[in-house]
């Protein structure tokens, strides 16, 4: 207290006795053009101004010892000592490489040249100006090396991408930690337009300051701040025309559908479900779609050929607007923004409307105290179009019913059709109501300068989310009409049958943080930065739901007005975290860089004796280009090598995709029973606890090199890393004999990710034309290095032995396994049988290695071979018997990999060296600028991975009455009419197996490599072209800057994957949007 | 300035104090009891025992065992999916049926073991209650082992709590597991505080009783072919209070009779979400309250097995001359509704029906008499063609009729609509609720599901006697007792042990259908293969012929189920059941 008071008095003394005068001047670029908007600041103070439209500036009351700092985006920041000058005209040089570029790191910023860790930084502010964005996460694709961004769902509000930093490090939660302005948050909660920059901390050295939970990398989001001494009103907005990137198709000609259904019945000697008369009726009706039937109904309605994909997916217009106001005085800055997003989605009633607000305020109360706030929030409304159910049922219908006609829903028309063929349009509309999310997040902060170089930051953050939902049955959609006759086949639901439910869920959390910072420069060559911090966090969430049945009227749905109690549920959850952390950063002579971090974390998810984890890191760098011996090498402008080592933690105790906050505590949960007609609660152990549960830790070593050549025009960064995660928190399966109890979460496997990341580019400017091209690529090799032991598969005394179940786990998808020395979730599949194409030995005995070449019984020889094999005692699973109802023409058979004479049993499965996770990730950006035109392109892609795709309704050849058939199998499935070898429908060279009217027949749907496809793809994520109006014109429109642009998102995809968009993954889901946008950026 | 400093100082102090909340990291679950506190009070001990009972609510411990009929003689499933792969012949040891059957019953066993480890000492209880609770839990443990041993024929035995990594014992023999079951049941029987039966309306109604323990032990002896002991135990049951319900057979399965003394031990259901059965969803039709899916349906063979009302065997030709010599497609004509339109006639002619036998008026009446003149249990159990069902549709109760082909469920026809309207199947009446008030929902129906009832005990006793003393009059009388309640004449002309054995078996099929008993009976008798898997059998329409899908017998090894594949892989002490290919 005394000391700083003294200091302040001293500063005031100096200031009051200095001699001052005014300075003016002009700032221009190399070609002599005046530069407006250049920041001119008196070094070490907040005093300053901005150049006017002619590049002129004026500053009052400066002393001769003052240094003026001129800064402008894209120009080298230049410092000019005032001395005795009163006029200073300066030329700012363009900054090509950005030597002074500053990168946001944990709890601070650092010059990029001084970084010793591996940090990718994205100038997000520019990006958001250029294209429509419905969320932040999916916009990151292709922008930084080693970061996989996969958007697997396009449903508005759920369309956030999965982000993986440097591969799958663990078997549990792989999401990177997201820090928004210093506080943990959700990436997609932020309005993209509010973001200034995003940094991705990839190695342990840069992330270790976040110790716990930083094992999957850290994404740091910094939002915009107001700028001093001026005020801007900025409008950014766009309208985009959205359509699905990719849709799967069904057979929608009903006559064809019926024919194929009959074929699939014939194939297994089952009765044909449709008569030829019915099929002919459809064929005839199609010739005269508008002719009226006997009841006066047009043929297209009475004999429908519904294309459900067209019925469900629509094109739409997305709107995105943001208005922001920013500015400040010498002492204070502010930024206020208001955003509005209306994304109606690609499916009826699935859209969202979202309103965002932000206020970032900061003020210097005096010369030692700064206080401020960053406060933001949103509210979002989502309509209850029942997409998930509609998708689930999309293949459980046929083209033989009308979706909607005169506001009514159709019913199957043909005799023989299933009466439970669903009406998807009705399902989509079967729930009325709304989901509303409201989120509020505020940080209050203060910075106190205690001594020169020493400061104390105090940050307090409070966030609260409140979700409320109502859902009421829409009884009207249950009415189904057979339009050909006008008969009501199913009635509307009456009010007494309608359900109404309410859900409220809420979470709240606080973070409290104290930081002490000290920085000093000693003897001009020793730069020292020290940080010490304390942080605690607490999070609490709850939900309540209730449901009643029986309304007094379909429009009235409050709980009080509903009659029958169905259920009330609710639960709550919490967690807490306490941490101490610190950083020591030392730079000698701008050449030798050294940094050490530590973090000591305690998590409520672990037993007190196992609660604390220490996560240190060390890193060093050598800026070789700063050495005197390099000064003569002109073509190298920058050369730095970096090395780091560190340890990170993860406390994500995941179970079934959700965090279990109390996994170390054994508990008894409630069970349900009744006695004598009354409910009675019971208690039973609900899970096996693990008292020894503790931190999962990841050790990362990183070696990097940064270079730039030829006046910084050519640049590259290369990183090599080795990331070893051990004590992975996972839920290994337990003996089934232990019952239904949840297994314990345990620290188990060890996973190694090794990789290389390369980033490079070229940028230059000639005259009015400037351009840059850059690309990044990352190779990652993933392997489980330690798990439950080595796999043994061998013959022992004539019996085949394997310990597979003992040493490996199955993922949620049963064809993905985890085993030591293999990729996480590696495919574990059968092979289809591949014979050599010969059949019998000369003595007439069957050739064991003979038979069909491509896994399918196609010819009579093939069939004779398998019959002879079966007669010789070999078994072909799963159907075994060689008959039309078992294995026949057009069926797949599987290889006998272990040689036990049983083809396709459990021992014939094998690992495939591929997983659904890409081994290679790459991206490229091209940007061009000519006069007032600008153009940007972003490509992103993934390679080196495969997707197992076998999906009902799309490429599934087992059929069922009332279910759709995929268009892709219509013309490419095996068919052989044995009684007529010249039947024009015969297709013995088809790709897909024969149709079978036997939905669960496992013969052709065994998990085999037959359904495993390369999923590599490259996408043009964004193409944007903009034009900034000349100042003279924009002035007339009362604007300072006016840019209009065209932008396309997800314009095209190049891939060989036959299924849905490979980015979505192995199952059809809500398609991703292709957007064609027109927008404007206006500064007033 | 000083003021601000003070404020900051104060603020900093608050901050630091707030940060020193010592117990910040000591969070505990909000909705459960920590294991250290469990069993420490009478209330918690009660709740712990009810936790063992609630294990009966799993599919294969109690609640849904009735659906096993779909794998057996009495019933069929409309689709070749899920557990039905057992009869289509493509099931493997990794099928969820085996995994869940195993896990669910072991879950009950471990809950019981936990209770039995803590009830004797840890729980503060009055001694009489302690004895009763221990006996109840032993009964339940025996029931779970019983479920396992019937199908796996020898399983690992755990009789005390076990550490997770110790649950890797080898199988005990089938006999050894029966011994375990007998021991537990004997303990329950000898417990003086276990009541014989509970009166209807007793707050404890639904708990295990001595009658239940004797009945289950008798059944165990029947499995062990120890007929003398079985006879003694089953005979004992009748002295403890159970009696046959004497009202109409179909009323026995209504909620009003769920506490009748015939019901010896039932899974308790009430009409609350999570507390009821879902027979309505699984068995009923679209015009039943809650709109059912008729997933499981009566098998035509089962329907045809019912005797004529006078006790003579049924034969189609007696009612429809020439029926058995016609092709199934031709037979369709008998099942058609009166007054077919010309289009409909053309359609059925196309399908191969012998339309020369069609009667524009009287076609319905002709087929109806096939079902009217039969064992009353047929119509009480099954919705037969042109019989009526009192259902619920569009907010009102209405009477529907099962007709072919289906036209509309609206007035005036009110045809019974199903999920399989393009096929003509029999439907269950048993367990299906009528009108709009019998169940609040199709997913939680209120009627208790009996696991043991007195008619079952009487027929088991008849079997135990007949196996010892073939054709014994007392055995015949026991069968007749059950028949009399159903309204059937006594059996006559019993020609000896084998004949009576067959009659007892049939009586069990008719009396106990759709109660989860038939499959295990057929497995115990070794008749499953012949009754279900004879060549050409499958899920079929009323007139037979081309099956919806076929059944395939893959070998006698099906009589013993496989240990779940995952468990065999994980626990190398376990030997897979012979015959099952991995």
Image (cartoon, coloured by chain):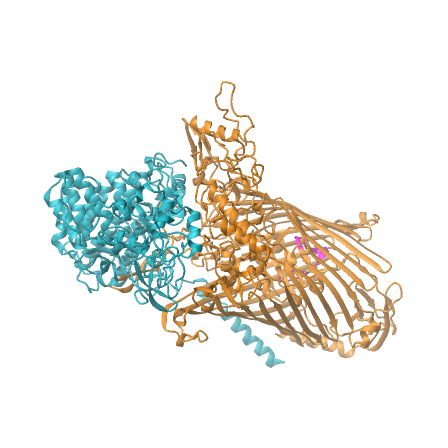
Quarter the N terminus of chain B occupies: bottom right
A664 horizontally vs A957: left or right: left
Colour seen for chain B: cyan
Quarter the C terminus of chain B occupies: top left
In depth, the one of A739 and A1058 nearer the eye is A1058
- For the point 43% across and 40% down, which residue is it? A806
Quarter residue A17 falls in = bottom right
Image coordinates for residue B380, horizontal then vertical, percent: 25, 56
- For the point 65% across and 68% down, which residue is it? A319
In depth, the one of B212 and B409 nearer the eye is B409
- For the point 17% across and 43% down, which residue is it? B463
Which region shows up in magenta? Answer: A104-119
Is any atom of residue A576 visible in this view?
yes
Colour seen for chain A: orange
A978 horizontally vs B72: left or right: right
B215 horizontally vs A913: left or right: left
> Is A136 within the magenta?
no
Image coordinates for residue B368, horizontal then vertical, percent: 28, 54
Is any atom of residue A445 visible in this view?
no
B509 horizontally vs A664: left or right: left
């Amino acid at each position: 207290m005394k000391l700083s008071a003294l200091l302040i008095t001293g500063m005031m003394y100096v200031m009051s006795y200095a001699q001052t005068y005014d300075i003016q001047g002009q700032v221009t670029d190399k070609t002599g053009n005046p530069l407006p908007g250049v920041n001119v600041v008196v070094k070490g103070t907040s005093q300053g101004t901005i150049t006017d439209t002619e590049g002129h500036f004026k500053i009052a009351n400066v002393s001769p010892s003052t240094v003026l700092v001129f800064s402008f985006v894209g120009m080298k920041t230049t410092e000019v000592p005032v001395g005795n000058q009163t006029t200073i005209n300066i030329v700012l040089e363009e900054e090509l490489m950005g030597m002074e570029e500053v990168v946001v790191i944990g709890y601070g910023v650092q010059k990029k040249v001084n970084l010793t860790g591996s940090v990718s930084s994205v100038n997000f502010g520019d990006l958001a100006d250029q294209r429509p964005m419905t969320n932040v996460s999916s916009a990151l694709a292709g922008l930084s090396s080693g970061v996989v961004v996969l958007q697997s769902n396009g449903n508005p509000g759920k369309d956030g991408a999965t982000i993986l930093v440097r591969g799958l490090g663990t078997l549990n939660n792989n999401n990177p930690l997201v820090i928004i302005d210093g506080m943990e948050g959700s990436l997609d909660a932020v309005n993209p337009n509010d973001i200034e920059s995003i940094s991705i901390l990839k190695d342990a050295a840069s992330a270790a300051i976040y110790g716990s939970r930083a094992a999957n990398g850290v994404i740091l989001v910094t939002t915009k701040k107001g700028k001093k001494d001026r005020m801007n009103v900025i409008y950014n907005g766009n309208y985009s025309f959205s359509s699905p990137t990719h849709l799967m198709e069904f057979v929608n000609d009903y006559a064809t559908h019926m024919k194929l259904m009959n074929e699939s019945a014939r194939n297994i000697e089952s009765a044909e479900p449709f008569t030829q008369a019915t099929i002919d009726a459809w064929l005839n009706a199609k010739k005269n779609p508008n002719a009226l039937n006997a009841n006066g109904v047009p043929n297209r309605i009475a004999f429908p050929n519904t294309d459900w994909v067209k019925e469900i997916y629509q094109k739409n217009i997305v709107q995105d607007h943001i208005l922001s106001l920013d500015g400040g005085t010498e002492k204070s800055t502010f930024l206020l923004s208001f955003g509005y997003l209306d994304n109606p989605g690609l499916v009826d009633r699935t859209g969202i409307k979202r309103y965002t607000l932000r206020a970032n305020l900061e003020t210097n109360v005096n010369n030692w105290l700064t206080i401020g706030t960053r406060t933001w929030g949103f509210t979002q409304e989502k309509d209850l179009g029942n997409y998930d159910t509609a998708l689930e049922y999309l293949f459980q219908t046929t083209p033989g019913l009308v979706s909607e006609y005169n506001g009514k829903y159709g019913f199957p028309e043909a005799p023989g059709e299933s009466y439970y063929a669903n009406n998807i349009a009705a399902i989509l509309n079967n729930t009325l109501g709304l989901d509303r999310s409201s989120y509020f997040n505020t940080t209050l902060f203060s910075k106190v300068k205690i001594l020169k170089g020493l400061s104390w930051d105090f940050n307090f953050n409070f966030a609260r989310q409140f979700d409320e939902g109502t859902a009421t049955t829409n009884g009207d959609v249950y009415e189904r009409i057979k339009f050909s006759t006008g008969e009501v086949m199913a009635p509307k639901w009456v009010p007494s049958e309608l359900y109404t439910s309410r859900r409220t869920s809420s979470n709240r959390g606080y973070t409290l943080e104290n930081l002490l910072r000290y920085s000093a420069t000693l003897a001009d060559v020793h730069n020292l930065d020290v940080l010490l911090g304390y942080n605690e966090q607490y999070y609490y969430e709850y939900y309540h739901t209730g449901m009643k049945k029986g309304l007094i009227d379909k429009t009235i749905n409050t709980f009080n007005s509903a009659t029958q109690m169905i259920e009330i549920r609710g639960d709550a959850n919490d967690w807490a975290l306490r941490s101490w952390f610190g950083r020591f950063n030392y730079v000698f002579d701008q050449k030798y860089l050294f940094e050490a971090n530590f973090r000591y974390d305690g998590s409520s998810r672990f037993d007190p004796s196992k609660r604390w984890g220490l996560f240190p890191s060390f890193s060093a760098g050598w800026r070789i280009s700063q050495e005197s011996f390099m000064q003569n090498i002109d073509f190298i402008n920058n050369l730095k090598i970096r090395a780091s080592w560190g340890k990170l933690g993860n406390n994500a105790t995941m179970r079934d995709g959700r965090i279990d906050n109390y996994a170390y505590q054994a508990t008894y949960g409630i069970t349900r029973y009744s006695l004598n007609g009354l409910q009675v609660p019971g208690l039973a152990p609900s899970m096996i606890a693990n008292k020894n549960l503790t931190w999962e830790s990841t050790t990362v070593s990183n070696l990097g090199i940064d270079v730039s050549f030829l006046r910084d025009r050519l640049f590259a960064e290369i990183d090599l890393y080795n990331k070893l995660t051990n004590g992975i928190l996972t839920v290994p399966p337990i003996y089934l004999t232990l019952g239904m109890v949840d297994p314990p979460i345990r620290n188990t496997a060890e996973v190694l990710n090794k990789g290389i990341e390369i980033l490079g580019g070229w940028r230059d400017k000639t005259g009015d034309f400037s351009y840059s091209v850059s690309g990044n690529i990352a190779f990652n090799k993933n392997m489980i290095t330690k798990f439950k032991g080595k796999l043994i598969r061998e013959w022992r005394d004539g019996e085949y032995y394997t310990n597979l179940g003992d040493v490996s786990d199955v993922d949620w998808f049963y064809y993905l396994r985890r085993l030591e020395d293999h990729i996480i979730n590696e495919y574990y599949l059968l092979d289809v049988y591949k014979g050599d194409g010969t059949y019998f030995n000369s003595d007439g005995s069957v050739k064991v290695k003979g038979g069909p070449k491509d896994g399918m019984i196609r010819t009579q020889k093939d069939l004779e071979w398998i019959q002879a094999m079966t007669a010789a005692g070999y078994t072909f699973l799963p159907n075994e018997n060689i008959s039309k109802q078992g294995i026949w023409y057009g069926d797949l058979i599987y290889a006998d990999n272990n040689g036990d004479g049983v083809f396709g049993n459990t021992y014939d499965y094998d690992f495939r060296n591929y997983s659904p996770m890409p081994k290679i990730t790459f991206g490229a950006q091209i940007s061009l600028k000519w006069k007032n035109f600008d153009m940007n392109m972003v490509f992103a892609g993934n390679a080196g991975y495969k997707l197992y795709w076998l999906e009902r309704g799309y490429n599934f050849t087992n059929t069922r009455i009332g279910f759709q058939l995929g268009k892709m199998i219509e013309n490419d499935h095996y068919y052989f009419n044995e009684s007529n070898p010249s039947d024009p429908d015969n297709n013995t060279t088809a790709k897909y197996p024969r149709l079978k009217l036997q939905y669960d027949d496992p013969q052709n749907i065994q998990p085999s490599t037959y359904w495993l496809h390369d999923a590599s793809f490259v996408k043009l994520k964004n193409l944007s072209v903009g034009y900034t109006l000349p100042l003279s014109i924009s002035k007339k429109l009362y604007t300072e800057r006016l840019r209009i642009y065209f932008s396309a998102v997800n314009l095209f995809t190049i891939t060989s994957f036959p299924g849905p968009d490979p980015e979505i993954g192995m199952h059809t889901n809500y398609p991703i949007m292709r957007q064609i946008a027109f927008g404007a950026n206006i500064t007033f | 300035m000083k003021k601000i400093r003070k404020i900051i100082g104060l603020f900093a102090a608050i901050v630091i104090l707030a940060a020193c909340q010592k117990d910040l990291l000591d969070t505990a679950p909000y909705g459960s009891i920590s294991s250290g506190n469990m069993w420490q009070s009478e209330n918690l001990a009660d709740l712990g025992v009810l936790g063992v009972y609630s294990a009966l609510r799993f599919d294969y411990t109690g609640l849904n065992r009735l659906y096993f009929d779909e794998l057996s003689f009495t019933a069929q499933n409309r689709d070749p999916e899920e557990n039905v792969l057992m009869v289509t012949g493509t099931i493997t040891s990794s099928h969820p049926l085996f995994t869940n059957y195993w896990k669910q019953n072991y879950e009950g066993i471990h809950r019981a073991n936990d209770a039995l480890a803590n009830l004797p000492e840890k729980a503060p209880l009055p001694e009489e209650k302690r004895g009763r609770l221990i006996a109840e839990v032993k009964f339940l443990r025996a029931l779970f082992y019983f479920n396992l041993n019937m199908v796996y024929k020898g399983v690992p035995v755990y009789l005390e709590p076990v550490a997770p990594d110790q649950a890797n014992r080898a199988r005990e023999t089938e006999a050894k597991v029966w011994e375990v079951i007998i021991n537990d049941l004997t303990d329950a029987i000898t417990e003086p505080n276990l009541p014989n039966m509970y009166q209807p309306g007793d707050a404890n109604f639904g708990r295990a009783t001595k009658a239940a323990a004797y009945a289950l032990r008798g059944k165990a002896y029947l499995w062990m072919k120890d007929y003398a002991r079985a006879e003694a135990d089953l005979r004992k049951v009748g002295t403890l209070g159970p009696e046959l319900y004497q009202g109409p057979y179909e009323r026995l399965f209504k909620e009003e009779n769920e506490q009748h003394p015939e019901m010896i031990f039932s899974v308790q259901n009430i009409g609350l979400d999570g507390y009821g059965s879902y027979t309505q969803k699984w068995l009923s039709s679209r015009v039943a309250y809650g709109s059912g899916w008729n997933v499981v349906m009566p098998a035509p063979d089962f329907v045809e097995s019912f005797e004529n009302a006078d006790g003579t065997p049924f034969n189609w030709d007696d009612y429809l001359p020439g029926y058995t010599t016609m092709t199934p497609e031709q037979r369709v004509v008998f099942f058609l509704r009166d007054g077919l339109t010309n289009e409909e006639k053309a359609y059925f002619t196309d399908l191969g029906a012998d339309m020369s036998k069609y009667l524009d008026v009287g076609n319905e009446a002709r087929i109806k008499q096939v079902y009217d003149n039969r064992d009353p249990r047929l119509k009480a159990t099954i919705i037969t063609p042109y019989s009526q069902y009192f259902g619920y549709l569009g907010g009102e109760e209405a009477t529907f009729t099962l007709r072919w082909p289906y036209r509309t469920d609206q007035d005036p026809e009110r045809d019974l609509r199903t999920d399989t309207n393009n096929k003509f199947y029999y439907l269950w009446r048993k367990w299906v609720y009528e009108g709009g008030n019998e169940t609040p929902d199709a997913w939680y129906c209120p009627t208790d599901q009996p696991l043991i009832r007195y008619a079952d005990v009487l027929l088991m006793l008849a079997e135990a006697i007949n196996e010892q003393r073939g054709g014994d009059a007392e055995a015949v009388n026991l069968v007749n007792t059950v028949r009399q309640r159903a309204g059937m004449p006594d059996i006559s002309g019993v020609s000896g042990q084998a004949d009576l054995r067959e009659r007892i078996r049939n009586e069990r099929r008719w009396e106990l259908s759709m109660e989860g008993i038939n499959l295990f009976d057929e497995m115990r008798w070794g008749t499953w293969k012949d009754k279900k898997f004879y060549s050409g059998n499958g899920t079929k329409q009323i007139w037979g012929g081309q099956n919806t899908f076929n059944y395939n017998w893959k070998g006698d090894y099906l009589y013993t189920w496989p240990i779940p594949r995952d468990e065999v892989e994980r626990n190398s002490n376990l030997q897979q059941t012979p015959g099952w290919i991995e």
